[in-house]
Image: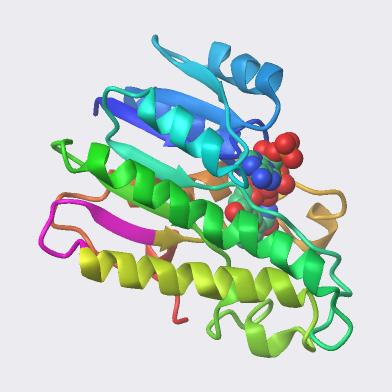
Amino acid sequence: MTGTVLITGATRGVGAAVAALLAEDGYQVFVTGRDPEAAQQVAAGLPGRGHRGLTLDVDDPVAIENVLSGLDELDVLICNAAAYVDWTESVLAADLDAVRRVMETNLYGPWRLAQAAVPLLRRSARPRLVMVASGAGSHGDAMFGLPHRNGLAASYGISKAALLALTSTLAAQLADTPILVNATCPGLTATFDGAEQMGARSVAAGANSVAWAVRIPDDGPRGGFFRDGEPVPW
Ligand SMILES: NC(=O)c1ccc[n+]([C@@H]2O[C@H](COP(=O)([O-])OP(=O)(O)OC[C@H]3O[C@@H](n4cnc5c(N)ncnc54)[C@H](OP(=O)(O)O)[C@@H]3O)[C@@H](O)[C@H]2O)c1
């Protein structure tokens, strides 16, 4: 496969590992993140040529406009960057200013990115738009889903539920185009302290679950939510 892919929050964790997988697939990767040096370092370490490290804070509409308007082409957008919250945050005690910041990163950032990227994706022969969501934003995840956390990590789950709704709604708007819009979940992945003790899987495995939505064929699914290629009810 060849083409260009832009990944947000690709300076570490799942995003950096997805960058490595897609570079191995033959993509030219735009590694983006808030830390310019880290973005360039990840890009420099990828196999293949032409990769770039770009500064992009998804909370910043001007940065989104500047980065996307600087691209001549784009085949794949992966909205991976996310804000986490204190796991003890509850609906009733949450600081709504903090909630708004979470929504900025996890919902409005991807929304703005989609608006900026779709004109480029429309010119691609094999366009894909991937939202990295979470079982925490679904009703179908038996361990971390919305009804299974005693109402905790509230804004994270609610922001990811809204991201799933955005995915479905955008896919409906783009139904008559070749752009395949889907959401994926990496599963519980060892990107944070203590994750392995919780049973998290490797970062490569989590990244593979995200890359799946790029590798699907042109007649593949639209508007779905998947983990390891299997639908997750949401
Ligand atoms: N790990 C899991 O178990 C798990 C499970 C389900 C879903 N997910 C989802 O998978 C995705 C990747 O998670 P991860 O575990 O790899 O997370 P991570 O290790 O915390 O990495 C998050 C990345 O997002 C970046 N980021 C945060 N805010 C940003 C912003 N405003 N603008 C641009 N970049 C920003 C971070 O950059 P900085 O270095 O600048 O902070 C970092 O590169 C997320 O969408 C997450 O919700 C993860």
Q: Residue at x 72, y 73 (%)?
A: 155
| Magenta region, main secondary structure | loop
Q: Position of residue 137 (x, y in %)?
A: 59, 75
Residue closest to the eye, 27 or 86: 86
Q: Position of 131 compared to 33: left or right?
A: left
**Residue span colored magenta:** 174-182
Q: Residue at x 57, y 14 (%)?
A: 45
Residue closest to the eye, 119 or 177: 119
In this rendering, is residue 85 above or below 14? below
Do we see residue 202 in this rendering? no
- Would residue 28 be counted in the magenta stretch? no
Dividing the image into 4 quarters, which one contains the N terminus?
A: top left
In this rendering, is residue 67 above or below 175? above
Q: Position of residue 203 (x, y in %)?
A: 63, 43
Q: Residue at x 80, y 89 (%)?
A: 150
- Would residue 176 be counted in the magenta stretch? yes
Do we see residue 207 in this rendering? yes
In this rendering, is residue 64 above or below 173? above
Residue closest to the eye, 114 or 186: 114
How is the rendered protein coloured?
rainbow
Instruction: Please identify the quarter of the rendering in which residue 40 is found.
Output: top right
Find the residue positioned furthest to the front: 62
Q: Position of 144 compared to 226: left or right?
A: right
Q: Position of residue 55 (x, y in %)?
A: 60, 26
